Amino acid sequence: MDLVFNLVSLGVSKVQQLSGFESDRNVLRTRKMEDKALEVYDVIRSIRDPEKPNTLEELEVVTEKCVEVQELGEDEYLIIIKFSPTVPHCSLATLIGLCLRVKLQRCLPFKHKLEIYISEGTHSTEEDINKQINDKERVAAAMENPNLREIVEQCVTEPDD
């Protein structure tokens, strides 16, 4: 019985591939992920730099290309952000990562898992910072610090808010 089921499944898959149905589905899925990535980028682009009067977009800390979205399940996504600090020894890279996490957790209207990294080769301590900004306990502890929380709020709050 399993053999028959496998043969029928294989036959259906081949028909879908030959008819272009599978290709159309992949195109739609790719387009959906690109749309989600743009939605994510629209949320993070306006985050303000902690020490400059510019946004992360203006400083090219984040770009459209730094956002990747993968589908995990129905209406659940994995969001991967790879940002680039302005200098390799940026002392505020961890704070920028925290701002990205806080803003996305607050603003995204869909279920997601979030991974935030410093782009490879753009910071002298990128491994350590990547661990910090993806550790839920460290993030929670950081947000309990009133001074740090105030800085994050200033960075993630829209000018109109």
Image: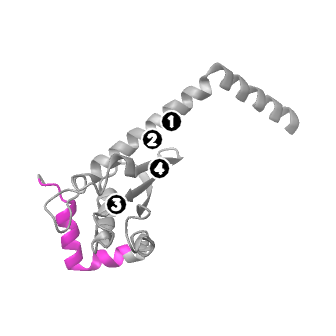
Disc 4/disc 3 C-alpha distance (Å): 23 Å
Residue drawn at 47 percent across, 45 percent down: 75
| Label 2 SS | helix
Among the two numbered marks 4 and 3 on one chain, the one whose residue lies closer to the N terminus: 4
The image quadrant of residue 118 is: bottom left
Instruction: Kindly check if marks 2 and 1 are in contact, taking CB atoms under 8 A apart as contact.
Output: yes
* Residue that badge 3 annotates: 84
| Label 3 SS | loop
* Badge 3 density bin: few <14, some 14–19, many ≥20, Cα 10 Å: many
Among the two numbered marks 2 and 3 on one chain, the one whose residue lies closer to the N terminus: 2
* Residue that badge 1 annotates: 29
Residue drawn at 55 percent across, 26 percent down: 24
Disc 1/disc 3 C-alpha distance (Å): 28 Å
In magenta, the rendered stretch is 139-159
| Residue 154 or residue 128, whichever sits in front | 128
Residue 75 drawn above or below residue 126: above
Disc 2/disc 3 C-alpha distance (Å): 22 Å
Q: Is residue 150 left or right of residue 139?
A: left
The image quadrant of residue 123 is: bottom left
